[in-house]
Image (cartoon, grey):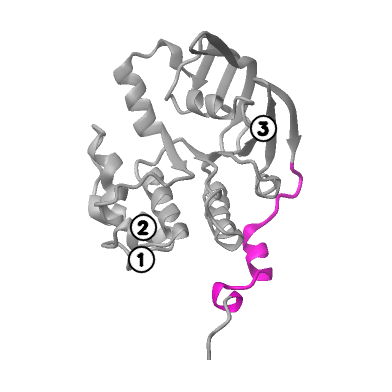
Amino acid sequence: MTDKAIIKIENIFKTYKIGDIKVKALRGVDLQINGGEFVAIMGPSGSGKSTLMNILGCLDVPDSGKYFLEDIEVGKLNDNQLANIRNMKVGFVFQTFNLLSRFSTFQNVELPTIYTKVKLKNKNFTINKYIESVGLKGKEKNKPNELSGGERQRVAIARALINEPTIILADEPTGNLDSRTGEEIMAIFQNLNRQGKTIILVTHELDIAHHTQRIIYLRDGLIIKQEKIENPVTADEMLLKMPKLEDRIPVSK
């Protein structure tokens, strides 16, 4: 982790209009995240978590305030520049995986490279390298319906990594997974963080948040508390204590 801010937001406000009702999603948020940090964002429904993530991922823009990503002021970018930032500097991992059902593992991981102007050297080798890095060697040709939930999330992580982004945004990445599979996914994120990746994770599960280095608590569009985690839970150690799938399911005789 470095002392240099990779993300800096200043006095961010965002209001949505739903019919005649105005919803103040963010109400003056200030936040700094340094390169190589692993951060969790928590808060109840309606606290502003998703809005904050959308702004950090350049999927939405604030009504006022400033957002700097690697010293680039995002609010001054046009639509094409924003699209390029999203594709090259941000990797997204979602709770629902967001894989294309007709595409194989290889094709889903390849997808972000199709929309970038920067062409990967040894493209096929690189795609296979990332597929192998998340433990899916041999599953390159499988479609999503031929994979388990945990395997689909691994595909989504490989896809998020393929353009070697500056930050990874993970929105409830363990939300649809059982506890052991969730730990396996957190082990991947922790390994990526050890390699220097900056990861921002939204979760409603406190035990998952304790795998990170800092927890940011949101309520009513405001950051109400930040907690530094001195000894993050290590997913690899948790997995050693948990039964494997075959140990949990009785075998019929």
Say which element carries label 3: loop
Q: CA distance from mark 1 to mark 2?
A: 6 Å
Q: Marks 2/3: CA distance?
A: 34 Å
Name the amino acid type tagged 2: Ile
Between discs 2 and 3, the one toward the N terminus: 3
The image quarter in which residue 119 lies:
top left
Residue at image coords 53%, 24%: 51
Give percent across and percent down for residue 91. 42, 38
Q: Which residue is mark 2?
A: 131
* Residues under numbered marks 1 and 2 in contact, where contact means CB atoms less than 8 Å apart: yes
**In this view, 207 is above or below 80:** below
Q: Residue furthest bottom?
A: 253
User: Which residue lies at the image location 54% right of the left edge and 40% below the top edge?
Assistant: 199
Q: Nearer the viewer, residue 227 or 100?
A: 100
Q: Looking at the image, which residue is at 64% across and 41% down?
A: 204
Taking the magenta stretch, the answer to whether it contains residue 236 is: yes
Q: Which mark is residue 246?
A: none
Which label was assigned to residue 137? 1
Q: Foreground: 1 or 108?
A: 108
Residues in magenta, as a range = 229-248
Give the label on residue 44, or none.
3
Residue drawn at the location 27% of the way across and 43% of the way down: 111
